[in-house]
Image: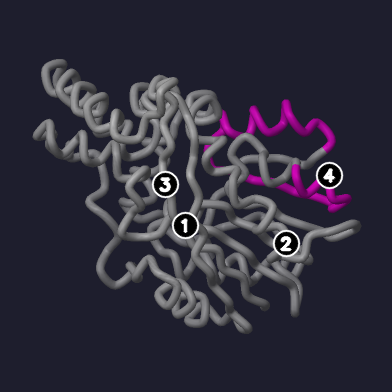
Amino acid sequence: MPVLMTGFDQCERLMWAGRGSAYAESFARLCAYPVPQLLDAAEVGPGVRMLDVGTGPGTAAAAACARGAMVTAVDAEPTMVELAKQALPAVDVHVAALPDLPFEDGEFDAVVANFVLNHVGRPKIALAELRRVVRPNGWIALTIWAAPPAPGQALLGRAIQAAGAVRPPHLPAGLAPEEDFPRDESGLTGLMDAAGLRETRCESLRWDHRATAEEWWSGPAAGVAFGGQMVQSQNPLIRAEIKRNFDRFSSAFADEDGVLTLPHAALLARARR
């Protein structure tokens, strides 16, 4: 029986609607950083039947294809799916979303989900669905953003807060308390264990993402993700104040050429069915 979407899920769908290209031109390069480690964790190699859940523009799927894997990819947002299809014409890419995936039990040898669990309303149920579609002893590997956020990741939020922006009603305040979990190694490991997975391992990833201030601002300016929706939902005066604070805070990360070095932190976990 299909699982009903939560209010959080519905807000996420609206938040990302039509923003495939804006994401690809702004934050996709940031989110590509853990892909090699993610595929290693899932033991993706020649002949492995891999499912990429939340493929976005197809970054992890493309890397898996380069390893000789047999790849299927899905995303909840149609504009992401179109980008992935253009990049990967030989890969089966279509629209589908957690926690209801259109696949048989145990259909894949490995499942990866790069920064997807941050965007679902019932993370444990989503993990149980990933477990369902991987074969016994197959690997699930995933990444999520760590909390508290690293300084580079927190830059936009600081600018929004300093401008006195108010969260609009259409944006989710967060997960229901009974669905949430600590965004640290023990919290993610515990969640995966609770979803029936085994041999769970989790590690922290830290890296410096380099981008110009214009590139880093382009995502929020286009309404990408929660921060972008916060920016776009404000009146013109508050939007201008957010940008002023963004420019002010960005200067601490800039080199002599104006390129920002932005520290980020994420969690990488893997487990077997």
Neighbourhood count class around disc 4 (C-alpha, 10 Å): few under 14, some 14–19, many 20 upward: few
Q: Are marks 2 and 1 in contact (CB under 8 Å)?
A: no
Nearest to viewer (mark 4 / mark 1): 1
Neighbourhood count class around disc 1 (C-alpha, 10 Å): few under 14, some 14–19, many 20 upward: many
Q: Which mark is residue 66?
A: 4
Q: CA distance from mark 2 to mark 1?
A: 16 Å
Q: CA distance from mark 2 to mark 4?
A: 13 Å
Q: Which mark is residue 40?
A: 2
Kindly identify which residue carries mark 1: 266
**What residue do we see at 45% from left, 72% from top?**
185
- Per the image, is 83 magenta? yes
Tell me where the magenta segment starts and ends, as one range. Answer: 63-90
- Seen in the picture, residue 39 relative to 10 is either above or below; the reply is below
Q: Secondary structure at mark 3?
A: strand
Q: Is residue 126 left or right of residue 245?
A: right
Q: Amino acid at mark 4?
A: Ala
Nearest to viewer (mark 2 / mark 3): 3
Kindly identify which residue carries mark 3: 263
Q: Amino acid at mark 2?
A: Asp
Q: Is residue 218 visible?
A: no
